[in-house]
Amino acid sequence: TGRRNNANELSRDEWLGLMLDREVAMRADKRVRNRLASARLRFPEACIEDIDFAAPRGLDRRSTMALAQGEWLKAHENLIVTGQTGTGKSWLACAFGRQAARLDHSVLYA
């Protein structure tokens, strides 16, 4: 009936809402896990949150974080990462790949 018998118990509607929220979250997590597995990233642990902007690579925090929002993906644009050898281009590309998967885009590292 949707009534509470005890202050600690959830109503049927609250319980159903929590279960639906859990199912949606689990499906989203599974979708991201599957996309990341298919992506075959060279550095699967790389993520936008771990970018070191203090390193002398010339990365601009504002433009990097703007790219992380994924508008370039929605616009079907490309992202080219350039720089000297050993500056972390592959790692950065993997971080953007992981972010793209989080934003529900397919990714493939080649």
Image (tube, helix red, strand yellow):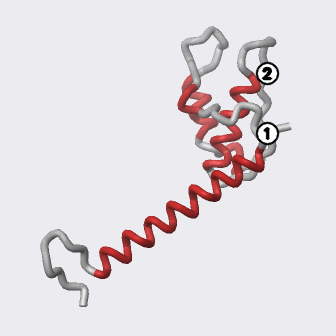
Amino acid identity at mark 1: Asn
Image position, residue 57 (x, y; %): 66, 13
Residue that protrudes farthest toward the bottom in the picture:
1
How many neighbours does mark 2 have within 10 angstroms: few (below 14), some (14-19), or many (20 or more)?
A: few
Which mark, residue 59?
none
At 14% from the left and 81% from the top, the residue drawn is 5
At 71% from the left and 52% from the top, the residue drawn is 35
Side of 18 where 98 appears, left or right: right
As measured in the structure, the alpha-carbon distance from the residue carrying label 2 to the one carrying label 1 is 13 Å
Which mark, residue 78?
1
The reply to whether the C-beta atoms of the residues labelled 2 and 1 are less than 8 Å apart is no
Side of 64 where 84 appears, left or right: right
Image position, residue 47 (x, y; %): 60, 34
In front of the other: 71 or 23:
23
Q: Secondary structure at mark 1?
A: loop
Residue that protrudes farthest toward the right in the picture:
110
Residue identified by numbered label 2:
82
How many neighbours does mark 1 have within 10 angstroms: few (below 14), some (14-19), or many (20 or more)?
A: few
At 54% from the left and 31% from the top, the residue drawn is 49
- Quadrant assignment, res 52: top right
